[in-house]
Amino acid sequence: MDRVTTQWINSFAGTNVLVDTFMIATTKFGVPILVVLVIAQWWSTVNVSHVRHTCIAAGLSFLVGLAVNQLILIFIHRVRPYDAGASHLIISKSADWSFPSDHATTSIAIVAAFAFRGLPRRALLFAVGALLVCWSRVFVGIHYLTDVLGGGLTGLVAAALVWRFYPEGSRLDRFVTSIL
């Protein structure tokens, strides 16, 4: 089922120059744009300390998610779909294993950090970007759908861990959120 779904999503790659260009740009620049948008939240004029705490939590969730992915990669060596003949690649090849998707992990970690801290409008804005990033990874042929789903789950777990162990209002939090 994973292969079939991945092939269906990827089947549209190479059929429309505008869509291909958009998806390639999304897969290359989507995560950096999300990071810049998180950084921009630092200067929010509404509920400043809470939003700043959430920005720090989003960054920590991003990093924890990537660290967990590196641990997973020690044990799971999934071949990329283009190497298995399951997708048509329209970007450069990747040198690492396919599962889980780091792009999905990082983008979903950001969304979850904002959602877990009760900022639904901001979380929704980030969710739109994260879903585009996740879809683009399958579209361009670099990941299976389950690579993206697994990465998204890792991002959720990372954000939940940060939510649990990085409390708002702690001494460290007050210090960090007072910067700038």
Image (tube, grey):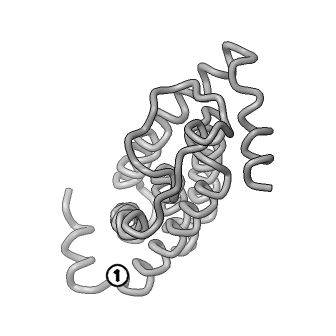
Instruction: Give coordinates of residue 111: x percent, y percent.
Output: 55, 60
Q: Position of residue 33 (x, y in %)?
A: 44, 39
Nearer to the camera, 63 or 42: 63
**Quadrant the C terminus occupies:** bottom left
> Which residue type does callout 1 highlight?
Tyr
Q: Is 62 rendered above or below residue 33?
A: below
- Measured along the vertical axis of the image, is residue 86 above or below residue 151? above
User: Based on the displayed image, in which of its 4 quarters is residue 2 positioned?
Assistant: bottom right
> Looking at the image, which residue sits at the far top?
17
**Residue 54 visible in image:** no
Task: Work out whether residue 104 can be spotted.
Answer: yes
Other-residue count near label 1 (Cα within 10 Å), few / some / many at <14 / 14–19 / ≥20: some
Helix, strand or loop at mark 1: loop
Which quadrant: the N terminus? bottom right
How many numbered marks have been drawn onto this rendered protein structure?
1
User: In the displayed structure, does residue 122 sit left or right of residue 42?
Assistant: right
**From what the image shows, is residue 95 above or below residue 151?**
above
Q: Residue at x 40, y 77 (%)?
A: 162
- Indicate the position of residue 139 as horizontal and vertical percent values: 66, 35
Q: Residue at x 27, y 68 (%)?
A: 177
Drawn side of residue 168 relative to residue 76, left or right: left
Residue drawn 41% across the image and 52% down it: 38
Residue occupying the point 37% across, 81% down: 168
Q: Position of residue 145 (x, y in %)?
A: 67, 51
> What residue is pinned by disc 1?
166
Q: Looking at this view, is 127 or 97 the one in front? A: 97
As drawn, which residue projects farthest toward the front? 84
* Horizontal side, residue 30 vs residue 56: left or right: right
Q: Toward which corner of the image does residue 66 lie, by quadrant?
A: bottom left
Figure check: 179 above or below 163: above
